[in-house]
Image: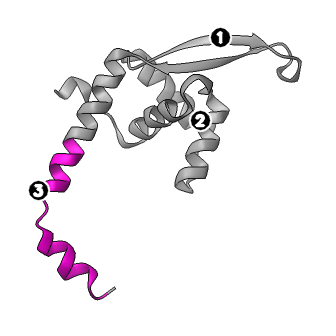
Amino acid sequence: MKDFQLGEFEEIVILTVGILNQSAYSVGIKDEIELRLSRTVSMGALHTALNRLEEKGYLKSHSGESTEERAGRPRRYFEITALGKKAMQHAKDTRDELWSAIPKTLWQANLAGI
């Protein structure tokens, strides 16, 4: 399943594309990540991740309508492919397996003093 591995930021980006569903474009993705994670995202890093995810076949993009506010340039919208959904499921399953393997006593012992 190494083929389906996502980096941390790639996982955040593809999850956010899923959250935004039909309205996932770069500025919207950036704003959603910053809002949900209280984390600053540079457009350069975001575009790099989006392009990488598209090259891997996890996302596909299409151009939207041209608008005056964007000086006639269309927005580029992203959607998750079937392969991308497999990668997301692999990431979730892997994390769930790791989380479930942590002994419950670890949480009881370490959180009591906080």
Query: Where in the figure is residue 94, as x and y percent of width and height?
Result: 20, 41
Going by the numbered disc 1, the residue's amino acid type is Ser
Query: Where in the figure is residue 33, as x and y percent of width and height?
Result: 55, 45
Position of residue 34 in the picture relative to residue 12 (left or right): right
Q: Residue at x 64, y 42 (%)?
A: 31
* Mark 3 or 2, nearer chain start: 2
Nearer the observer: mark 3 or 1; the answer is 3
Q: Residue at x 84, y 13 (%)?
A: 72
Q: Which residues are magenta?
A: 94-113
Q: Which residue is mark 1?
A: 63
* Number of other residues with Cα within 10 Å of mark 3, as a class: few under 14, some 14 to 19, many 20 or more: few
* Mark 1 or 2, nearer chain start: 2
Q: Which mark is residue 29?
A: 2
Q: Is residue 5 magenta?
A: no
- Relative height, residue 97 to residue 10 (above, below): below
Q: Is residue 40 visible?
A: no
- Relative height, residue 113 to residue 101 (above, below): below
Which quarter of the image is occupied by the N terminus? top left
Q: CA distance from mark 3 to mark 2?
A: 32 Å
Is the Cβ of the residue at disc 3 closer than 8 Å to that at disc 1? Answer: no
Q: Which residue is mark 3?
A: 101
* Mark 3 or 1, nearer chain start: 1
* Residue 62 position by quadrant: top right
Going by the numbered disc 3, the residue's amino acid type is Ala
